[in-house]
Image (cartoon, rainbow, N blue to C red):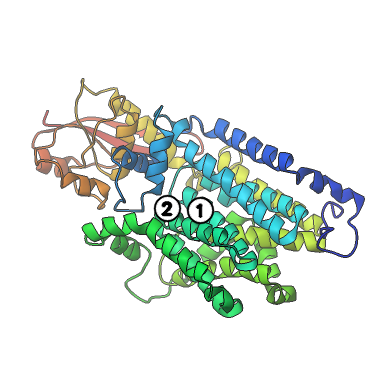
Amino acid sequence: MTAVVGPDVDRASASPPTELTVLERIGQPFGLVALILLFLALQALYGAHLPLFGDEAYYWAWSRQPALSYFDHPPMVAWLLRLATMLATSEAAVRLVPLLCTGLSAWLVQALARDVYGKRAAVIALLCFLVMPATQFNVLVVTPDAPLMLFWTLALYAGQRAVFSGGRGWHLLTGAAVGCALLSKYTAILFPGALLAFLLLRRRDVLARGDSWLAMLVAVLVFSPVLLWNSEHHWISFAFQYGHGTSPDAVLRWGPWIGFLAGTAMIVSPVLFVVAVTAVLADKTRRDGPTAYLSAFFLLPLAFFVWKGLFHKIELNWAAVAFPAATVLAAGFIARRGLGKTLAAALACALLLSLAIRFPVEMGLPAKWNPLNRLYANRAAVQALLALRRPAEPLLADHYTTASLLRFYAPDHPVVRIPTPSRYSQYDLWATNQPPSTPKGLYLAGSERGRELALACGRVALLRVFAFGAPGFIPQTFYFYRCGA
């Protein structure tokens, strides 16, 4: 395997061995496109009938009521879902969003690697990006992370062109991409932070360009719908996300922190993560401008979440914005050093972990680690409840995820209410625009809620206790009620 990769012919004085032409052939545009399309086709087949995750249905519910922004996140995921489901409402239509976002992100990752390190590095970066567990999670379900990854990688690519080649077009594209990333998820604020840190340390001359300030203005203008919406809603979205990612105390939480570090290495692929860190620490990184640029977008976002993780539980997907730069750094290091065995180990490790995500039962994953636990149970419960529904009977739920799943799977997609205490969500904002009335209809809950439900709607009848269980899955229980019976 050591003969598979090596330094690019345009990056080294020596000519590459003839065995390296394998990567060169794959590195042609047709080969790269074919590789991405194959990946997307396999994923489309896998995810076409995979039940919706509760949050996916929640974002789809947003798309049914278009707005400039929403309580939990900016609006990009809802806007894209609106487009994807214009002709049909199905799991396959919903999953078009992560498919297209991931496919375009993959192309941008290889394009960035090609610009910085050459053709073979581009192929390595693409292969690593497609098989890494983080990408497998991102393409599996639709979340704000899918458009965030797309526009972050676009900003990373355009920013590299703007900084090292100049040109107003690249500056404006960088600004627009940053604005769209901010429209996707607030985590994108780390991009201008990392860019500013790099420019102050290595390229202050770029800050003197008028085009740089114009790019900043474009980013703010693109992001302005969210600013306008928040100004009209007392900045509740910003406040919620700040509280969601910040601990009120300063108590160190070593257990979750160590778990976050280990989990981060796992979803990148441990070998690839180590190679990326090694590339950052290499002497050449400090001398090579483009490599230092990539290091800023790997280290600074990751360092931010490593620091936050000392005091607050950090979800693994929050740090995913650091992975495109890490992938390109690792690919460049492998290509320059001819580390074929390292590449094989990185791909094998990533593929094994990704298969565990896709086929947890077949791979022998313990039930408590099965990432598909809530998908099948929730859909089965929703379908069982809908079988009891009278014509046009209203639907109620105990949580924003169950409410959204009910709305998605019900043939008429009715508005669903949450009459019992629950985590504050976009449903509470929608409720402020609805006339007050006593709730009635079928109610779905993940726990016994009869007493609370009786306080909200008077007469209550427990229709069924629905248990779902399957080999390799955690058993789950749901409660079906009829309100106002």
Q: Amino acid at mark 2?
A: Ser
Is the Cβ of the residue at disc 2 closer than 8 Å to that at disc 1?
yes
Expressed as whole percent of the image width and height from the top left, the position of residue 419 reads: 17, 42
Kindly identify the residue that appears in the image at 66 percent across and 46 percent down. 351
Nearest the viewer among 151 and 362 is 151
Residue 433's place in the image compared with 288, above or below, is above
Q: Left or right: where does residue 146 sit relative to residue 418?
A: right
Say which residue label 1 marks: 151
Kindly identify the residue that appears in the image at 13 percent across and 36 percent down. 439
Say which residue label 2 marks: 184
Q: Amino acid at mark 1?
A: Phe
Instruction: Farthest residue to the top: give it.
Output: 391
On-image quarter of the C terminus? top left
Residue 120's place in the image compared with 337, above or below, is above
Nearest the viewer among 463 and 14 is 14
Label number found at residue 206: none
Choose top left, top right, bottom left or bottom right for residue 411. Answer: top left
Q: Secondary structure at mark 1?
A: helix
Q: Left or right: where does residue 161 sit relative to residue 234?
A: right
Choose top left, top right, bottom left or bottom right for residue 445. Answer: top left
